[in-house]
Image: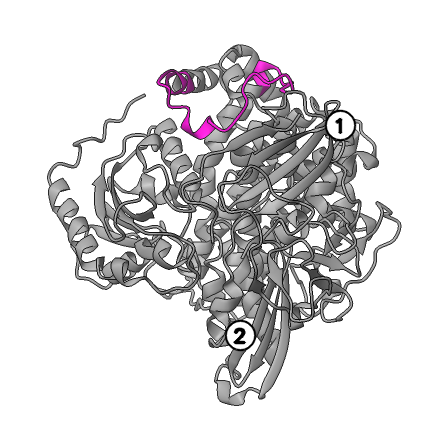
Amino acid sequence: MQALTETNKVAKPSTLILGIGNYLMGDEGIGVHVANVMSQMDLPGNVFVLDGGTGGFHLLEYFEEFEHVILIDATLDEQEPGSIRTIKPRYAKDFPAAMSTHDIGLKDLVSALQLLNKMPIIDLVVVSIASIQQQGIELTKDVESQIPSVIASVLRLLQFNKGEKQLESTYVF
Amino acid sequence: MSKRIVVDPITRIEGHLRVEADIENGKIKDAYSSGTMVRLLEEILKGRDPKDAWAFVGRVCGVCTSIHSLTSVRCVEDALDIVVPPNAELVRNIMFCAQYIHDHVVHFYHLHAMDWVDVVNALKADSKKTSELAQSISKWPKSSVGYFSDIQTRVKKFVESGQLGIFANAYWGHPAYKLPAEVNLIGLAHYLEALEWQKEIVKVHAIFGGKNPHPNYLVGGMACAIGIDDVSGINAERLAYVGQLLKDGKDFVEQVYIPDLMAVASFYKDWGAIGSGLGNYLVYGDLPTNGYRDLSSYKFPAGAILNKDITKVYEVDLKKEDEVQEFITHSWYEYKEGKDKGLHPWKGESKINYTGPKPPFEHLDTTKEYSYLKTPRWKGHAMEVGPLARVLVGYARGREDFKAVVDKALKDLNIPITALFSTLGRTAARGLESTLVAEWGIEFYNQLLANIKNGDTRMAEMSKFDPATWPKQAMGVGHTEAPRGALAHWINIEDKKIANYQLVVPTTWNASPRDHKGQMSAYEAALIDTPVAIENQPLEILRTIHSFDPCMACSVHLYDEEGKTISRVSVLGD
């Protein structure tokens, strides 16, 4: 994947599809798996896909750079493994209570964006997983089989926000 | 009878660390540090191509990704006897320096500052006085009265909306906060400045490593092609951009980080006598100027100091079986030859045997196993690793660059060198080495430009890339200095595949449980005698633990009970 730097940026892409997760911890890495699949897809030119790893503040640049960010992540919410939910978080507290091992960094990042008055429109697609006790890079069947549905959710969000970019971008204090 | 305080988790980022401390008469009498999460990367790596290991280890943690990848390619290069071209070394060094100043600034402002700076109190500051103070300690341009009053307005709205979020894990109004409101406001303003700045410096990694997070590394060199007129490679424009980022980084360290650090430290000099701990320091060294194998050429010299005696520095050999060893007496692991034997990492084993209580639990049985961290020892000694160790070894080796920054700081704060063996010393050392590293980054950059100008654009040594050229068996060790301390990976290659791979990471050195002889590791030792004014608000514990810059994700090789992600402080017993 091409790096997003000042020097190789041609036009400002408007939507970032950002997969979050730890690739080494089984289902916890679902966001990264989805990003890897989507980076091979033929998407509109203003859409950029990024494997965000477990990064927190490192990702600030990307949140500031895009008008719209679609986050894909795993969650431990006691729903059936593979359940998909879409959430439009306004504050850090709107993120699911138990969002995997990297939630602290991500929530702090969202609070930081508010404080800097630079919140993009954020859509969150969360996939329920049974546990992150697993080691290894493979996904369980329940979660792996949902990848096409997760992608379909992301594509719907892309469609929905088209032409409604400023919908909720006026997050003020 | 003493009371036991549990702080869990103690990190603000990545991973899980739990501290249990026994308090008597307002001071910590005994302490236990536990890693409650395990990743077992070693098992994931077995049987894979050694050339791919860097990509897996890079995933161990979102915070220090590139440093594990660097260590990994070095251990494979060591095993296969590959010497990388000078440019690859320079690019690695530049990425190292960029990561350091990023990591140290983020640690100071976004993880550690809240232990010293009272954000809520900053709202009471007089913006005019704050502006005068800021201008008296730094030439940083953003220091007007309007700038500071604007920051106050923004944060006030945030606090009033009930969305404290980012600042929620703190004990505002605690009596151990000693800064005047104006210094608190400067700290708060620069918290926001540092947020904006940090996203810039990481672009160095995106440029040389192709992406960030998780930049690309390569066994044999670096994967970035240099071509001054090349559109897709490292061209003149991108090189110039790196130069600008490094210069901006140096300015931020010199004009924001260091003045703030010194201003904050001047109100907390009592912390120069708290959190001393082991007094043993270990550094593997890094930043070669004449090739990775020439240890004497390192900007960060290697060495060990024992019992705070900086008149003597001991040599360290990571390949000798009796130097670095890992013990599991109090860890949830088992070794074939029993619990009390120490293993050199080349013979290391990573078999988990969890014997702790079923979560959620109140406290751990610290007389038995109580951590997923193994306990590393150097020649049997418990050692502290990190910025303080690096600064002390540089100083003890008589290096003028280290002496200059250390002596100036001691003079400015009017404290003796012995005050460095402390919580304050650890936090100060991180800033002091940042000034050195910011400078060195620019030196490496200029050297790289000079090489390119002279026609040397070699970036990788690929003659041994094909596994057919490898011996049947090979062993290697790769080392570095991660921002949080000495880091090494040990690899055994058999039949072109990874037979064994062991990581001994800085937080394992510092945060591990007691060893077979009952000796404490650095966190536990540093907490002894730390005062705790309010038991259910153990700010002082956070200060000392955060002074080590804990990052648990890599030091513990699963997860505790589901959903336990909210900071918990409980006071047990009477």
Quick check: can you spot residue A158?
Answer: yes
Residue denoted by label 2: B220
State the image coordinates of residue B243 (x, y, percent, origin top left): 50, 51
Mark 1 in CB contact with mark 2 (< 8 angstroms): no
The local crowd at label 2, few if under 14, some if 14 to 19, many if 20 or more residues have their Cα within 10 Å, is many
Q: In this rendering, is residue B464 above or below B140?
A: below
User: SS class of the residue under badge 2?
Assistant: loop
Do badges 1 and 2 share one subunit? yes
Does residue B472 appear left or right of residue B525 in this picture? left
Q: Earlier in the sequence, mark 1 or mark 2?
A: 2
Magenta run includes residue B158: yes
Callout 1: residue from which chain? B
Q: Nearer the viewer, residue A61 or A73?
A: A73
User: SS class of the residue under badge 1?
Assistant: helix
The local crowd at label 1, few if under 14, some if 14 to 19, many if 20 or more residues have their Cα within 10 Å, is some
Q: Amino acid at mark 2?
A: Gly
Q: Name the quarter where the N terminus of chain B is drawn.
A: top right
Does residue B93 appear left or right of residue A158 in this picture? right
Q: Nearer the viewer, residue B445 or B318?
A: B318
User: Label for residue B413?
Assistant: 1
Does residue B415 appear left or right of residue A71 in this picture? right
Which quadrant holds residue A98?
A: top left
* Residue at position x 51%, y 24% in the image: B188
* Residue at position x 11%, y 46% in the image: A159
Q: Amino acid at mark 1?
A: Leu
User: Label for residue A22?
Assistant: none
Q: Nearer the viewer, residue B473 or A28?
A: A28
Give the magenta-colored segment's residue range: B155-183
* Residue at position x 44%, y 20% in the image: B151
